[in-house]
Image: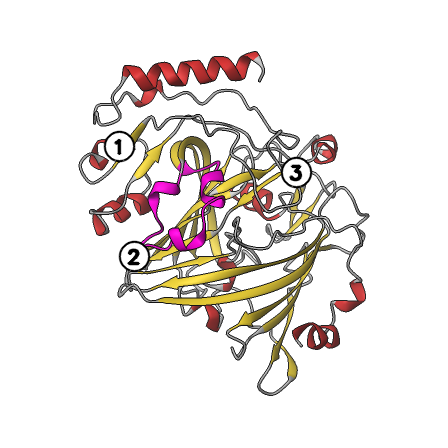
Amino acid sequence: MNNLFMIQKLLSLFFFFLISPANADFNIESIIIGDRQPILQPINEYNPNINSYPDPFNADEILFTIDKNNYLDYADKLLTPGQIEMFEMYSDTFKMNVYPSRRSCAVPREVTQLTNQNAKLIDEGEGVLGVVGSIPFPNPTEALHHVWNHILRYRGVNIYGSSPFYIVNPDTSITYGAGEAIAINYWNPFVKNEKGLQGMLMSKVTHPPRLADASLLVIESLNALKTPRRAWVYNPGTRRVRRAPDIAYDYKPSSNQGITTTDQFDGFNGAKDRYNWSLIGTQKRLMPYNAYKLHETEIDKLLTPHHINQEFLRYELVNVNVVQADLKEDMRHILPHRIMYFDQDSHNMLVEETFDEEKEIMAYREFPIMNYYDQPMCLSVHSATYDFASRRYQLSSVRSIDVPKIQWRLEEPHDETKFTPEGLKRFAR
């Protein structure tokens, strides 16, 4: 460990012993958000042959816990509206364990070497021109800068993986599903991209096998206005591939059971033209972060009623860039108002909240991130969506110690000619 890291750790321990975790008058000004300490290579305990990411911060103690007894003391300065709603709706079980802030996120050095100035927004923000593989807006000044930074953050190159998804009902019953996907990300520094594409994705539901939209092909461009998304679905019942122009915006795949929309996958994706976007500003908020403990826990221990088991979540004080999306008067979307919280360091969306036309909260979403330090890159361990009307929650894109490891940079690249309607039919089978 370097000296700066040791100083931060000693200061954090000092405040831990100085202030009781149960004390509702915890001085939030004493929580330190120090300098970045990106982890650029695997730690000594890491074993590349298994799907495990040992926690670099496992010695950290809980600074304090927020629960039903004291959440109002933190509501104005630390909590988001969605978190407050979670405390009020699930007061007996929801809590937040707050740990020292560890700014561990990193990207490959090649990404930072390409990053020197802002890209350019074109076509009303629907397109972006910049150095491929860079962080497109290292000096963001507009709402859509943060949205594009999230969309084009480094997420590997040639990808293969599978992951389960779960819907947990109020009666404690669980709907289980599983999927498999291959993808090519073109916005990265390791391949030459002259295609004007973000990437290509083929995914299929492997359980249950007879979902109507079980398999999907998406080709996403860097300009949704000039070259809209192209998508196809394969129906296992008819064994036919059809064009699917509706796989966008607020379309709800059957596997999601109405909880999330297509443009909520990976936080936010796709065209942005149905909303007016505004930048609220940079705030300090408690966010799910450095979620190594979550990744290292078996899934069956996480799936508790109403929300995941909060014992395994780590919250840290994080600088977030807050963006608001409000539906345009002449547009339609089932999510009229959205607030998104983007990590200032990694550009990941960490939280999203959705509101109805009366601006009553509809859902709270969390994306607990960690540094996959063998890459390195920061991505979420899962996407958790808490629907307040139905009191169900959905856990998707689950990455865990008991799930096969995702391959982010395959040694042998995918054959690009597979990403066609005929290729989708072969992939689906």
Q: Badge 1 local density, few (<14 within 10 Å), some, or many (20+)?
A: some
Q: Nearer the viewer, residue 127 or 313?
A: 313
Position of residue 304 in the picture relative to residue 220 (left or right): left
Q: Is residue 76 visible?
A: no
- Tell me: residue 158, above or below residue 231: above
Q: CA distance from mark 1 to mark 2?
A: 25 Å
Assign a secondary structure to mark 2.
loop
Q: Nearer the viewer, residue 342 or 154?
A: 154
Q: Badge 3 local density, few (<14 within 10 Å), some, or many (20+)?
A: some
Q: Which of the 4 image quadrants contains residue 201?
A: bottom right
- Residue at mark 3: 374
Q: Residue sitting at 47 percent across and 61 percent down?
A: 165
Quadrant placement of the N terminus = top right
Assign a secondary structure to mark 3.
loop
Quadrant placement of the C terminus = bottom right
Lower position in the chain sequence, tag 1 or tag 3 = 1
- Tell me: residue 330, above or below residue 346: below
| Contact? badges 1 and 2 (CB < 8 Å) | no
Q: Which of the 4 image quadrants contains residue 414?
A: bottom right
Q: Which residues are magenta?
A: 287-313
- Residue at mark 2: 305
